[in-house]
């Protein structure tokens, strides 16, 4: 009797271990993703900070284009010309002009994570060029209203993107996190968010 009970327990443990191994191998519930015919672990999201000077106050709106966000100074008083920083170290992947987005900079933060900055005031390569290494507080531009999609009001359209192969586009956007807090969902507003890019 004792031998049979131990045998059943051993079989149950072996079965559970097999199921766990198969789940991990298939990437189920483990933060893995399927890419190019192979399963690979998704890189941890960097600890992004707001792309502005430390202890400044901002308003974040998702409008109808969540997970992207639009950012202005709290109460939208004098956003034009405010300096913009990456909020996390990385390397400039691309700078360009787009008819709708205006002056745009895309930064690669490693592990498939990128950030995008639209409507910048100066020419897209005024402060940084493709291949430049940047830090959290490297000046990359200033808030502007370039491009036809700016609505003619100065703001920063900001995106966090994830893609393991090549530079991601708007279809690769992820929910925006600053200082570990998520800002997402259509039609949401946060009226006073303090930058911790210190």
Image (spheres, rainbow, N blue to C red):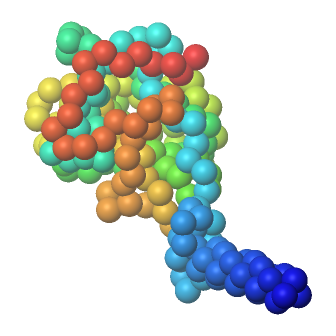
In the rendered image, residue 25, in percent from the top left (x then y), is placed at: 65, 79
The residue that appears at 30% across and 15% down in the rendered structure is 192
Residue 186 visible (yes or no): yes
Q: Residue furthest left?
A: 151
Q: Quadrant of residue 104?
A: top left
Q: Is residue 49 left or right of residue 71?
A: right
**Left or right: 69 with respect to 83?**
left
Residue at point 56% right, 62% down?
Answer: 31
Q: Is residue 71 left or right of residue 96?
A: left
Considering only vertical position in the picture, is 185 above or below 8?
A: above
Residue 127 in the image: x percent, y percent? 49, 31
Q: Quadrant of the N terminus?
A: bottom right
- Which quadrant of the view contains residue 170? bottom left
Quadrant of the image containing the C terminus = top right
Write down the quadrant of residue 137 in the picture.
top right
Nearer to us in this view, 174 or 76: 174
**Left or right of residue 5: residue 167:** left
Residue 82 visible within the image: no
Q: How many discs mark residues in the rendered view?
A: 0
């Amino acid at each position: 009797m004792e031998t049979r009970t131990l045998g059943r327990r051993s079989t149950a443990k072996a079965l559970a271990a097999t199921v766990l191994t198969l789940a991990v191998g298939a990437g189920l519930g483990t933060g893995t993703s399927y890419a190019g015919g192979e399963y690979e672990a998704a890189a941890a999201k960097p600890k992004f900070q707001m792309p502005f000077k430390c202890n400044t106050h901002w308003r974040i709106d998702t409008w109808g284009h969540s997970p992207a966000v639009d950012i202005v100074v709290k109460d939208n008083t004098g956003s034009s010309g405010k300096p913009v920083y990456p909020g996390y170290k990385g390397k400039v992947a691309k700078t360009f002009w787009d008819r709708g987005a205006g002056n745009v900079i895309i930064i690669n933060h490693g592990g498939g994570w990128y950030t995008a900055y639209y409507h910048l005031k100066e020419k897209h390569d005024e402060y940084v060029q493709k291949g430049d290494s940047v830090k959290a507080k490297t000046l990359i531009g200033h808030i502007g209203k370039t491009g036809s999609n700016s609505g003619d009001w100065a703001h920063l359209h900001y995106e966090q993107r994830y893609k393991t192969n090549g530079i991601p586009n708007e279809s690769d956007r992820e929910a925006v996190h600053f200082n570990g807090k998520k800002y997402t969902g259509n039609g949401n507003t946060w009226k006073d968010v303090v930058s911790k890019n210190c």
